[in-house]
Amino acid sequence: MGLVEDPHALGNLVSEGVRRIAADLPDANATHRDWVELARRLGEVISRFNSLSTEIAEPIQQQLCKLQRDADERLRGWLVQHYADLPSLPAAKGPVMVHHVPRYLALRRNVVEERVALLVFDGLALDQWFQIREHLAARLPGFSAEEGGCFAWLPTLTSVSRQALFSGLKPREFSNSIETTSQEPSLWARFWQENGLRKPEIVYQKGLKRTEQLAELEDAISKPATRVAGIVVDMVDEIVHGAMLGKRGIAGQINTWCETGFVEKLFLLLTEQGYQIYLTADHGNVDAEGIGRLSQGVVSELRGERVRTYRSEPLAASVPSEIDAFRFNSSGLPPDFLPVYAGTRGAFVPKGDQIVAHGGISVEELIVPFIKINIKRPAS
């Protein structure tokens, strides 16, 4: 996406992008690749929209919201027919779902890549990836990205989807820890040990977000034995859960974070230590509006406001009929883990409250970036 300087020209570009995507939504016979491409195009447009001034954005907002609603509705219809097939699709050319990622990396290691780093930017939607990419393209000489995408697990909660991502397992295969991420380090290590590595060759670190944390990471990844590194960068998810001004406000905060230089320093550190970098996310996020609280149910994390999960059928069936919610059962979940999703762009918070959330079924929450990062170092 080239830089467009004139704000009005950028507004026209966004409006035209919305119109084109609306005319080209995938139908019932679409492939998962069609949906990833749609999500990519939509992410580009949302990223551009979030950079517009309020004056230029306002006339376009309704048009964009309608596109998001239509795309989500179309996706839901498609998932009813096709979601159950996604977990078992072949992933040799790239992961279809997040739990395919470790297997794909293991294949890459066996072929050409001796050291591999998986960066999981918790909660990073595709539009936010495009924003970070633009920053890197301007600030990091030799940077390029091979861009793809894959499907998160439903419900789009960290404890479900990020565990699947690090373990290479379907959620029903880690049912004992489905409401926590505390088992991630051991699940990541187990996957790689089953694929021929020894424990000292495997690194897992989470909670990275600031430059001063990179020295500790460097100690771990620079050890000669280390072959794979799984790294959770959680600044975006932290920003999302504190957001007061919607996704447009989040875009400003991500810019401020990028200006600290953390992301390029992280990429350079890994590149200099000989790692091939892959970047992905466990789920995205959406602007949502409160449809009323649900008192019962387990929330798998503090702010999964777009979904409630229940441990029994009677409890799941007890959701009041006046609440705009729906069921979507996935064969990959434990039988006693029953999600109830907020309808459209709703959230189970007080009526009318505007928040940014995840957990639900939308293009922006479900289809996440999967990116191979390349940094060409100048010949010395």
Image (spheres, rainbow, N blue to C red):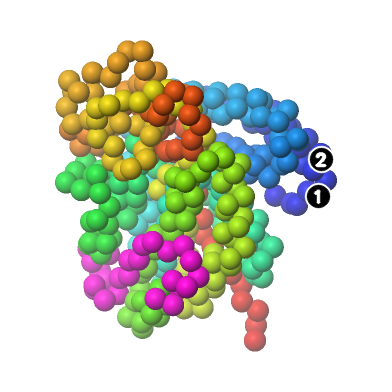
Mark 2 is surrounded, within 10 Å at the Cα level, by few (under 14), some (14 to 19) or many (20 or more) other residues, namely few
- Please provide the residue range marked out in magenta: 192-216
How many C-alpha atoms fall within 10 Å of the one at disc 1: few (<14), some, or many (≥20)?
few
> Do residues under tags 2 and 1 come within 8 Å of each other at their CB atoms?
yes
Residue 193 is a magenta residue: yes
| Amino acid carrying mark 2 in the image | Ala
- Asked which quadrant contains residue 234, the reply is bottom left
| Vertical side of 41 occupied by 167: above or below | below
List the residue tagged with mark 1. Answer: 5
Nearer to the camera, 304 or 227: 304
Q: Tell me where residue 271 appears, x and y as whole percent.
A: 51, 73
Q: How far apart in space, not on screen, are marks 2 and 1 (Cα)? A: 8 Å
Give yes or no for residue 140 being in the magenta stretch: no
Is there any visible trace of residue 118 in the rendered image? no
Residue in view at x 34 percent, y 50 percent: 162
Give the percent coordinates (x, y) of residue 93: 45, 52
Q: Is residue 135 left or right of residue 297?
A: right
Q: Which residue is mark 2?
A: 9
The disc labelled 1 sits on which kind of residue?
Glu
Q: Position of residue 144 (x, y in %)?
A: 61, 62
